[in-house]
Image: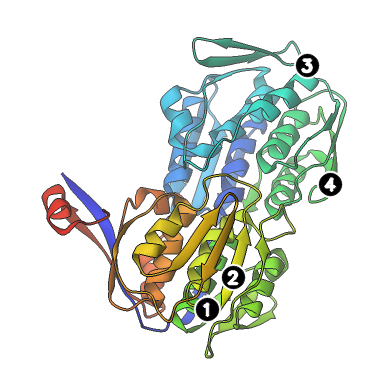
């Protein structure tokens, strides 16, 4: 049996210009929302990811005809309408719960199981179910399955105890198919939510306030599929900026949205990078020494994103001084630090706080991706390290980045994706 790994030879400053891929965290809910529309939806700039393929399989099981050609995904209802997502498909992606809202909004019934994906600690679906109950949905647990049904969905006032992105998206999609007005307060404000609302409004929905803490959805409108371009991926953009910072390089990202990334860009500047923006382009140069950042706290948007926490920690491992990161969103999101310590980082974790004491340099090692952003952080660190780093468990990275090795290669990085056998893994200790 063979596996794949990334081999990265560090110490080469990344240079050049790349175009930012479409946002995974926008493309997936947009695909789910297409369930609500008659006719055909054509999504442009969809990243070619394993999670996108998993979402396509779910749509096809639900009675759609979903086809992908390059970065274009077409979704059309084929007549039959299934309302159950098999357990294997639910577990294939962590965000599979996002299909709950649009299935209920269209068919008023849905059967699911618990979602899968990266192990980042508890991400209970209780908030999703509580919001659906507010709209008149009855929910039963039956042998590991969650059965949801309603004669009709009715608009409601819903207040979220936490500004969850997934719950906000599910409420919006269910409320579009409900009768009357839904007012959602303490909603998440992430740009991907505004992108979802923009798409649905273009299809004929009536949603206002998306991207703010109060969202109003006037349901009962007939929706028709449309052509829509997915927004740029701010976390993928941050990944390449961090890799350039770690390697001492100078890069330009085109097709980005700097306004969505202000908290990230401010931290990179604080770490000693020169950052400039012009329209949809972001420039980063790190010609001097990295500086420690005394305190970073992950917060809901517009705060510093939890998805960028691992990425910036890979940069700060070689900043001269002490950096402190507090993770307030997810538990178990410091697993990547063990791999960085194998590469020579000086890090310690106490509860939700990580303390990074900068070292002069990191060195190559054999490491295994622990989750999507943790795996990307290992690559970021590898480009600034001395020697060769082997990264395994690439299925995590494939969930969120298209053409990962090729993109870095275009920036001058010494990286290749190769296959190796289980016996070679045991002999060399790859990913151990």
Q: Earlier in the sequence, mark 3 or mark 4?
A: 3
Q: Which mark is residue 319?
A: 1
Q: Up-down: is 264 above or below 402?
A: below
Report if residue 168 is visible in the image: yes
The color scheme shown is rainbow
Element assignment for label 1: loop
Measured Cα–Cα span from mark 2 to mark 4: 31 Å
- Which mark identifies residue 323? 2
Front position among marks 3 and 2: 2
Residue 401 appears in the picture as rendered: no
Residues packed near mark 4 inside 10 Å, few (<14), some (14 to 19) or many (20 plus): few
**Along the polypeptide, which appears first: circle 1 or circle 3?**
3
Whether residues under marks 1 and 2 lie with C-beta atoms below 8 angstroms apart, the answer is yes
Q: Which residue is mark 3?
A: 136
Q: Is residue 94 left or right of residue 149?
A: left
How far apart marks 3 and 2 lie (CA) works out to 48 Å
- Local SS, label 3: loop
Q: Is residue 245 above or below residue 328?
A: below
Residue highlighted by disc 4: 213
- Residue 75: x %, y % from top left: 54, 38
Query: Does 192 sit above or below residue 7?
Result: above
Which of disc 2 and disc 3 is earlier in sequence? 3
CA distance for labels 1 and 2:
8 Å
């Amino acid at each position: 049996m063979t596996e794949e790994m990334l081999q990265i030879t560090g110490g080469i400053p990344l240079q050049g210009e790349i175009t930012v891929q479409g946002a995974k965290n926008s493309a997936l809910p947009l695909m789910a929302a297409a369930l609500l529309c008659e006719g055909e939806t054509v999504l442009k700039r969809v990243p070619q990811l394993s999670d996108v393929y998993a979402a396509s399989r779910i749509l096809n099981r639900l009675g759609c005809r979903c086809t992908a050609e390059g970065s274009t995904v077409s979704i059309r209802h084929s007549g039959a309408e299934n309302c159950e997502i098999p357990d294997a498909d639910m577990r294939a992606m962590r965000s599979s719960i996002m299909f709950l809202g649009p299935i209920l909004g269209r068919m008023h019934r849905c059967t699911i199981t618990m979602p899968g994906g990266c192990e980042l600690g508890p991400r209970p679906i209780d908030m999703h179910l509580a919001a659906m109950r507010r709209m008149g949905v009855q929910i039963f647990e039956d042998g590991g399955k969650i059965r949801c049904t309603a004669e009709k969905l009715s608009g409601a006032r819903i207040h979220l105890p936490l500004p969850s992105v997934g719950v906000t998206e599910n409420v919006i999609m269910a409320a579009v198919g409900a009768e009357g007005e839904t007012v959602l307060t303490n909603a998440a404000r992430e740009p991907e939510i505004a992108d979802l609302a923009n798409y649905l409004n273009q299809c004929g929905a009536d949603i206002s306030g998306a991207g703010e803490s109060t969202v109003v959805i006037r349901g009962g409108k007939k929706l028709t599929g449309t052509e829509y371009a997915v927004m740029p991926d701010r976390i993928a953009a941050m990944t390449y900026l961090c890799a350039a910072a770690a390697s001492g390089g100078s890069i330009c990202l085109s097709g980005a949205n700097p306004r969505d990334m202000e908290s990230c860009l401010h931290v990179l500047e604080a770490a000693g990078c020169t950052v400039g923006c012009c329209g949809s382009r972001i420039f980063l140069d790190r010609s001097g020494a990295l500086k420690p950042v005394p305190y970073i706290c992950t917060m809901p948007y517009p705060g510093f994103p939890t998805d960028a926490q691992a990425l910036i920690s890979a940069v700060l491992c070689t900043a001269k001084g002490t950096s402190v990161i507090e993770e307030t969103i997810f538990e178990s999101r410091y697993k990547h630090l063990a791999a960085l310590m194998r590469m020579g980082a000086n890090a310690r974790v106490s509860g939700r706080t990580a303390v990074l004491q900068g070292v002069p340099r990191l060195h190559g090692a054999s490491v295994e991706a622990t989750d999507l952003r943790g795996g990307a952080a290992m690559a970021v660190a590898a480009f600034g390290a001395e020697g060769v780093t082997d990264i395994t468990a690439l299925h995590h990275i494939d969930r969120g980045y298209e053409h990962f090795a090729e993109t870095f290669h275009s920036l001058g990085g010494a990286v290749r994706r190769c296959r190796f056998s289980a016996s070679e893994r045991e002999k060399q200790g790859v990913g151990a």
